[in-house]
Amino acid sequence: MKALLKKYVIGDTTLWIVFIALCIISAIEMYSASSTLAYSAENSASPMLRHVGFLLGGIIIAIGVHFVSYKHIRMAAYLGLGISAVLLVWVLLKGVTENGASRWLIILGIKFQPSELAKLSVIIVAADFISRIKDREKDEWKYFKYTLILLSVIGSLILFDNFSTAFLLCVVVFIMMFIGRISLLKLGGIAGIAIGVLIICFLLVSVVPKSYLPKRAQTWANRIDDYKKEKKDKKNKYVITDKNRQVQHGRIAIARGGTFGLMPGNSIERDYLPHAYSDFIYAIIIEEMGLAGGIAVILLYLVLLYRAGRIATNCDTVFPALLVIGLSLMIVIQAFISMSVATSLGPVTGQPLPLISRGGTSILITGIYFGIIFGVTRQLKTETMEKGEIEEKEDENMPVVALESL
């Protein structure tokens, strides 16, 4: 078995450990956090089995994708971009609406979130555009413009019903452009415009009556207002209402956790915390695994980012380096946004904790993220081994050449 794994599962060993560890934590915590779903299901085991099925699917996808050359990934991303653009338009017109947002499509009985495919495609295509900048004077403005158009079109389609995802995607691509050494003047200009637009939107939301705003704008305005009021209102800080039910029960779960937690399966707040299996699963992790478990999860994501940085520095070309950095940043930043929501450090956004929260599309697409990163490390190892074999053969032949010359 060990020999089989060494032969077919190649890549960065540390990242494989991080990936499998996150899947194991997900399976353990979902068993506990999905109790409310188990009560309402015909078969109490079906929510857990469904989640484990998606995790296994994500692992299989990661293994399969890591055999695909990143050169083929680059070409396939353009097809994925076209498909995701069509699906994003479709979801706005005919999508399934939950909690006031239209984010899902049902295709052949399978619930699918097009924004997840769009994020993946945009990161790969953006990495391709930035990597094509060879001459700063001739190429930079051209591919910088292409990247902005790409981000504007796809980001706008996502923005209608998922502001946090669109914002997250913009931040990741901006960091990729910074790492790709796009002119600081251009990046500063874009950052200034973006900040200005956000300020104007915030002022409009504050001034314009909420009844005149789009539904999602109203939702975000209410979330921001509730978050600000809660921070200011010290008197009713611990009062549980319908509006702050998630946040308050999340806090209670964290407070109950202590240093080492109540141990998996012993959570009490899972029965009171709405969406304990998705938006607030990190609170359940801390309740059951304590501060130690919460820190361990954070470290797993930080190790992923650190190893991705090391991998990028070992790449001989720009595209795979930017690809690995972009994908790892998307996973890690999303994870920290999700954890900040669960710990009341930010307003509720609906971002899942990658590989841990319930959500089939998110798990499978995250499996592709890891698969691509594994694929880059596999190719680097293969190239290094081939280079080493060539150097050994040259060293072996040198004495023979020397003797023949004599």
Image (cartoon, rainbow, N blue to C red):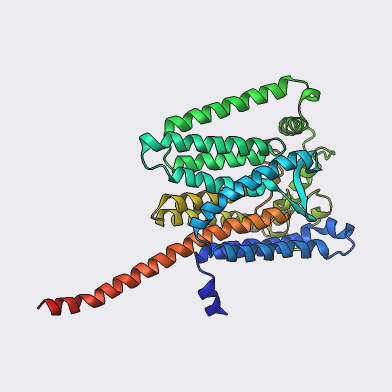
Q: Compared to 263, does 326 lie above or below? A: above
* Residue 331 seen: yes
Q: Nearer the viewer, residue 262 or 84?
A: 84
Q: Nearer the viewer, residue 159 or 34?
A: 159
Rendered residue at 77%/57% (across/down) = 33
Rendered residue at 23%/76% (across/down) = 397
Q: Which residue, as the protein is rendered here, is positioned at the far top?
A: 207
Q: Compared to 136, does 363 lie above or below? A: below
Please state the total of marks drawn on the protein image: 0
Q: Compared to 170, does 298 lie above or below? A: below
Quadrant location of residue 349?
A: top right
Across and down, in percent, residue 224 comes to 71, 32
Q: Quadrant of the N terminus?
A: bottom right
Across and down, in percent, residue 23 comes to 65, 62
Q: Nearer the viewer, residue 234 or 73?
A: 73
Quadrant location of residue 235?
A: top right
Q: Nearer the viewer, residue 263 or 383?
A: 383
Horizontal side of 48 relative to 120 (left or right) equals: right
Horizontal side of 306 relative to 121 (left or right) equals: left
Across and down, in percent, residue 180 comes to 44, 43
* Residue 355 seen: no
Across and down, in percent, residue 150 comes to 56, 38
Rendered residue at 56%/50% (across/down) = 77
Rendered residue at 85%/39% (across/down) = 242
Q: Which residue, as the protein is rendered here, is positioned at the far left?
A: 406
Q: Quadrant of the C terminus?
A: bottom left
